[in-house]
């Protein structure tokens, strides 16, 4: 594999990885803001 | 060949790192925030269709009462935790055609409405509801009434305990009122400081204007809530006893004793539990519907109080 292709693959993987992590973090913050007290406490032991 | 193997290895390590990191976030934080309750409980804080009046499968208390209304029906609304009570009142006193439910909400012409505490206080001030059943109003709700030039009458019809809740696996069973204030004021940040495990305390709160948030602010007695609503550690929250025991009925949650007193019916009745508040029937003083005082008088009668008690609350008399 040429260095150019390798660098492209690594760049694409990094972008996908960062975007998915940010999206997951954002989704978690959204859920956390809207979580009911009882549901949140209940899920602590699930 | 060796170069290719190294490149593949690097790519695999990067992918693996992201996958492990994201799975870690999901398991540690996201999963805990997912609300597994039913759509109705999530959206309305109560399963409206489980406590409908005039429904043979309804969980409400059904009592054949001597007092009946047939016309000029006061529109009733209120808090989630009190919905089973005011739905039972309607079931006992109103004619069957007085309520209509479209599967998700009560239709505008229905004499029974449900908009929860914040909506109910607005409705009674605006005149779209005649009587609401709620806990004490927040300062904002009182200010809204004042701004609109509306005087509200608060008639206590029952009692209820304000409770603190944790997960059933939390080893702490009892806290003092000062410890709870200490948690929410930011003095205690770790459960080990108050007899629990060595893990951070996540002090949960509700939105402004909800009945339980208003009760919490009153409990804090002017002390500012500074505790962080963190995603780390084990949580403590608050609610009203009947909401926890009677509506949510979640076996993973336990109520804490406060100052060594558990919030059961007996301790609420004899007021040994430290935070027993009144639940009110609230109406505008200038409401001209003659049935409003009659209905409230009936709520305070032996029949009305029997519904309050059988619904799981403590009567006022």
Image (cartoon, coloured by chain):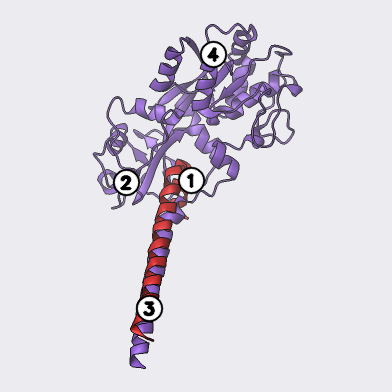
Chain colours: A red, B purple
Q: Which residue is mark 2?
A: B201
How crowded pointer 2 is (Cα within 10 Å; few <14, some 14-19, many 20+) is rated as many
Q: CA distance from mark 3 to mark 2?
A: 39 Å
The residue nearer to you, when weighing B301 against B131, is B131
Q: Which residue is mark 3?
A: B11
Mark closer to the observer (3, 2): 3
Q: Is residue B8 above or below residue B234?
A: below
Viewer can see residue B20:
no
Q: Residue B283: which disc? A: 4
Q: Do the dots labelled 4 and 1 sit on one chain?
A: no
Mark closer to the observer (1, 3): 3
A18 sits to left or right of B315: left
Q: Considering the numbered disc 4 on the image, is that residue within a helix, a strand or a loop?
A: strand
Q: Do the dots labelled 1 and 3 sit on one chain?
A: no
**Residue occupying the far front of the picture:** A4
Q: CA distance from mark 4 to mark 1?
A: 33 Å
Viewer can see residue A39:
yes
């Amino acid at each position: 594999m040429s260095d150019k292709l390798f660098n492209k693959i690594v760049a694409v993987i990094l972008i996908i990885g960062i975007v998915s992590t940010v999206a997951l973090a954002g989704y978690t913050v959204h859920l956390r803001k809207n979580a009911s007290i009882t549901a949140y406490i209940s899920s602590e032991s699930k | 060949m060796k170069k290719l193997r190294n490149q593949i290895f690097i790519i695999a390590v990067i992918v693996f790192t992201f996958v492990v990191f994201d799975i870690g976030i999901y398991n540690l934080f996201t999963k805990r925030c997912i609300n597994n309750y039913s759509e109705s409980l999530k959206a309305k804080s109560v399963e409206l269709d489980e406590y409908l009046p005039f429904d043979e499968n309804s969980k409400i208390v059904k009592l054949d009462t001597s007092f009946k209304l047939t016309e000029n029906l006061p529109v009733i609304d209120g808090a989630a935790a009190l919905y089973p009570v005011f739905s039972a009142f309607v079931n006992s006193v109103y004619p069957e055609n007085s309520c209509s439910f479209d599967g998700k909400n009560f239709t505008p012409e229905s004499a029974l409405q449900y908009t929860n505490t914040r909506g109910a206080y607005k409705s009674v001030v605006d005149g779209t509801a005649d009587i609401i059943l709620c806990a004490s109003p927040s300062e904002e709700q009182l200010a809204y009434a004042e701004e609109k030039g509306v005087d509200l009458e608060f008639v206590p019809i029952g009692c209820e305990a304000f409770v603190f809740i944790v997960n059933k696996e939390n080893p702490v069973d009892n806290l003092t009122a000062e410890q709870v204030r200490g948690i929410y004021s930011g003095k205690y940040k770790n459960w080990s400081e108050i007899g629990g495990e060595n893990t951070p305390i996540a002090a949960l709160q509700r939105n402004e204007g909800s009945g339980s948030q208003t009760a919490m602010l009153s409990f804090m007695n002017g002390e500012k809530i500074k505790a962080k609503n963190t995603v780390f550690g084990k949580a403590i929250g608050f609610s009203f006893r009947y909401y926890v025991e009677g509506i949510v009925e979640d076996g993973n949650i336990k109520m804490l004793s406060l100052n060594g007193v558990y919030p059961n019916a007996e301790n609420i009745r004899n007021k040994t539990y430290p935070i027993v508040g009144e639940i009110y029937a609230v109406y505008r003083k200038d409401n001209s519907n003659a049935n409003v005082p009659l209905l409230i008088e009936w709520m305070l009668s032996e029949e009305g109080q029997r519904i309050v008690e059988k619904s799981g609350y403590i009567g006022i008399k």
